[in-house]
Image (cartoon, rainbow, N blue to C red):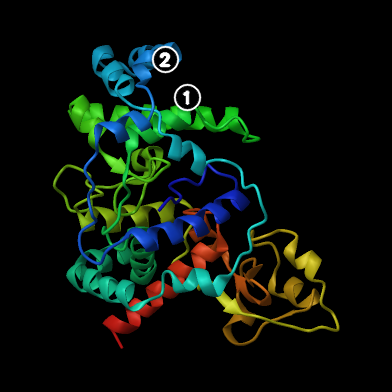
Amino acid sequence: MTTHTMTEAVPTRRLIALFFIAVITLSAGVSHGKPHKKKTSTKSLQALGPLYASRTEAMQFADDLAERRGLDAVWVRAAIGQSRYTPSVSRLMQPATQAFVKNWRVYRSRFIDDTRIEAGARFWRANQASLTRAEKEYGVPAEIIVGIAGVETIYGVNTGGFKVMDALATLAFDFPQSHPRAKERSVFFKGEIEQFLSLQSRLGAAPAEVLAMKGSYAGAMGMPQFMPSSWAKYAVDFDGDSRIDLWNSPADVIGSIANYFKAFGWQAGMPTHYPVSFDNSRLDKPALMAPDILPTFSVAGFAAKGAALEGEALNHKGPLALIELLNGPDEPQYVAGTENFYVITRYNWSSYYAMAVIELGRAVAEKVRP
């Protein structure tokens, strides 16, 4: 899956649509054991397109990057030059050509199922100490961390089948020109290449190793699907082995997710959302929906616009947002989102994603501690 991880890379509405599509693709392609690995034929390699070694722009970027970062120029040229243009990556970034009908119930069903809940329970039990420590140090509940790892990759079952360098190079040098923000997105992905290669150089990886690493179609990596820039900023060595491994170290994954949320303002002890109903005599839904998912209204301001709260929600001290979850042709569902709900959407700009994380985490928690 592509996530925060891709937050800076794709506009909100487009990302939501892409995420629904990606969910369907992931569900169709994942077995409940190890991911199926297909052999790559010569024909399929040719279908990827030419090597970036043939592109003057790419090689000039490699030289500039090496000089700017103090990296070995031959190593950088090899890593970028042996990357290939990948048409499927470019297609996945194309702007949506038709209206996409959002359906929370369908979306939810892709994530909240017995397979993912059972896998989450196994992950929780095996990593109880790390989850407890992360909650203590960062203030992020275990169920939120477990929800993220489950939604993103089913706890490492599917971390992506695209070669990271191929994906990043394709989006850096061949971002679809039909996209209204193509130039800006190209700059973003060039920055991701810089972060990725700087990291791999520090780790002493050979070009062949770098070229073999796999992730999402946007270059997100590991169990939590971190983009290279997020890896550089937020990933932590939580198991104390002096290296950060977001593929194989659950402790590093747990600590890094928690650190990410803390960096974006997670507040310990604050609920993510509250139930909400409407007082139709005062309801001003356009005003409530205007800020989108950004918490803006006080409890009193919420009530003044016709959004009715009860119980502990009435004592909430921070701002709230009206979160709308569409259900296709059926009635939407609504909740009052807090600042912590908004923090989850910084991992992926989608209220549907945030609710899936929350509900999967709760379902796993109920399984582990009924």
Q: Where does residue 176 sit, x and y in percent of width and height?
A: 56, 32
Distance between mark 1 and mark 2 Cα atoms: 9 Å
Left or right, residue 318 beside residue 298: left
**Residue 139 in sight from this viewpoint:** no
121 or 83: nearer the eye?
Answer: 83
**Residue located farthest toward the right when viewing the structure as drawn:** 281
Q: Where does residue 225 sit, x and y in percent of width and height?
A: 36, 50
165 or 6: nearer the eye?
Answer: 165
Q: Which mark is residue 282?
A: none
Q: Quadrant of residue 306?
A: bottom right
Q: Where does residue 359 sit, x and y in percent of width and height?
A: 44, 75
Q: Which mark is residue 55?
A: 2
Placement of 130 over or under 161, stated as above or below: below
> Could you tell me which secondary element the residue under label 2 belongs to?
loop
11 or 53: nearer the eye?
Answer: 53
Q: Residues within 10 Å of mark 1 (few under 14, many from 20)?
A: many
**Residue 17 in sight from this viewpoint:** yes
Verify CB contact (< 8 Å) between mark 1 and mark 2. Answer: yes
Kind of residue indicated by mark 1: Phe
Which residue sits at x=65%, y=80%? 276
Which residue sits at x=22%, y=46%? 245
Q: Where does residue 160 sit, x and y in percent of width and height?
A: 33, 49
Which residue carries the number 1 mark?
A: 173
Kind of residue indicated by mark 2: Arg
Placement of 315 over or under 172, stated as above or below: below
